[in-house]
């Protein structure tokens, strides 16, 4: 998406810019899509939490190897 930093600073200005572009070229599908996306953005939502990563060189709890299959006779 274009210029996400600008949108984060001023959502109303970004929507106004989309309106100006669409007034010049109403068939601009990319700008129409961007306008829809920007309008639905919630800048007050909390940031998503990242899953906790294991420290380098440690094994996850429970191990990663399964049991070996039993040999058939």
Image (cartoon, rainbow, N blue to C red):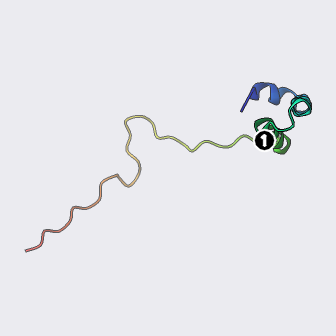
Q: Furthest-left residue in view?
A: 73
Residue at image location 29% in from the left, 59% down from the top: 66
Q: Is residue 18 left or right of residue 68?
A: right
Q: Is residue 71 left or right of residue 56?
A: left
Residue at image location 72% in from the left, 40% down from the top: 47
Q: Quadrant of residue 56?
A: top left
Q: Nearer the viewer, residue 60 or 69?
A: 69
The spot of residue 61 in percent (x, y) is 41, 51
The spot of residue 23 in percent (x, y) is 92, 32
Q: Nearer the viewer, residue 59 or 10?
A: 10
The spot of residue 46 in percent (x, y) is 76, 42
What is the tally of numbered marks visible in this picture? Answer: 1
Give the answer, above or below, for where 54 lies relative to 10.
Answer: below
Q: Nearer the viewer, residue 71 or 5?
A: 5
The spot of residue 35 in percent (x, y) is 83, 39
Characterize the local packing of mark 1: few (<14), some (14-19) or many (20 or more) Cα atoms within 10 angstroms. few
Q: Quadrant of the N terminus?
A: top right
Q: Quadrant of residue 45?
A: top right
Q: Is residue 71 left or right of residue 16?
A: left
Residue on which disc 1 sits: 33
Q: Furthest-bottom residue in view?
A: 73
Q: Quadrant of the C terminus?
A: bottom left
């Amino acid at each position: 998406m274009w210029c996400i930093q600008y949108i984060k600073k001023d959502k109303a200005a970004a929507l106004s810019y989309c309106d100006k572009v669409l007034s010049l070229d109403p068939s601009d599908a990319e700008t129409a899509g961007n306008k829809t996306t920007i309008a639905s953005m919630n800048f007050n939502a909390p940031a998503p939490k990242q899953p906790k990563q294991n420290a380098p060189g440690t094994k996850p709890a429970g191990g990663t190897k399964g049991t070996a299959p039993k040999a058939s006779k």
